[in-house]
Image (tube, rainbow, N blue to C red):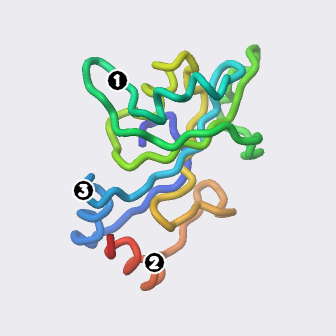
Amino acid sequence: MDFDSEGLLLLTDDGELNHHLTDPKFEHAKTYYAQVEGVVEDSKLEPIRKGVSIGGQKLKPAQVGIIDDPNFPPRSKPVRNYHPTTWLKIILREGKKHQVRRMTAAVGYPTLRLVRVAIGLIELGALPSGEWRELNSNEVAQLKKR
């Protein structure tokens, strides 16, 4: 994740688990909520669903849909609020640099706030910002299974 993003991070010293989470061949889904500038027309999201091309590189298709405001706590650096915004749920199976931000911008909706809410079956849930918990053995096994 980049400096301006929020949400779920998995920290590990388990090399096998790290390999499973970062190697694209395992295709662990990473789920993000993105607040984008503008009122989104669902049809404009179709290039993301089909695999948008950015800078001559075609990205893998991603699941994307419009969601209700998830009511996250305010950020320390507030999102500019002088334009209408829409929240999207985006599920990726690859992890290119700034991929969500680049995809939403490519279809005309710049990302203003980006929160990762899940990696595979591991969900952020109600864990407050700055807090942490350890994964249990079943969660680690599920992440290594793919």
Q: How many marks?
A: 3
- In the rendered structure, which amino acid carries the disc numbered 3? Lys
The residue wearing badge 3 is 25
* Side of 19 relative to 46 (left or right): left
Which of disc 2 and disc 3 is earlier in sequence? 3
The residue wearing badge 2 is 139
* Side of 124 relative to 119 (left or right): right
Q: Secondary structure at mark 3?
A: helix
Q: Is the residue 58 above or below the residue 2 in the image?
A: above
Position in image of residue 73 (x %, y %):
74, 45
- In the rendered structure, which amino acid carries the disc numbered 1? Ser
* Side of 91 relative to 73 (left or right): left
Residue 53, which numbered label? 1
- Pointer 1: residues within 10 angstroms few (<14), some, or many (20+)? some
Which of disc 2 and disc 1 is earlier in sequence? 1
Residue 93, which numbered label? none
Q: Quadrant of residue 64?
A: top right
Quarter the N terminus occupies: top left
Quarter the C terminus occupies: bottom left
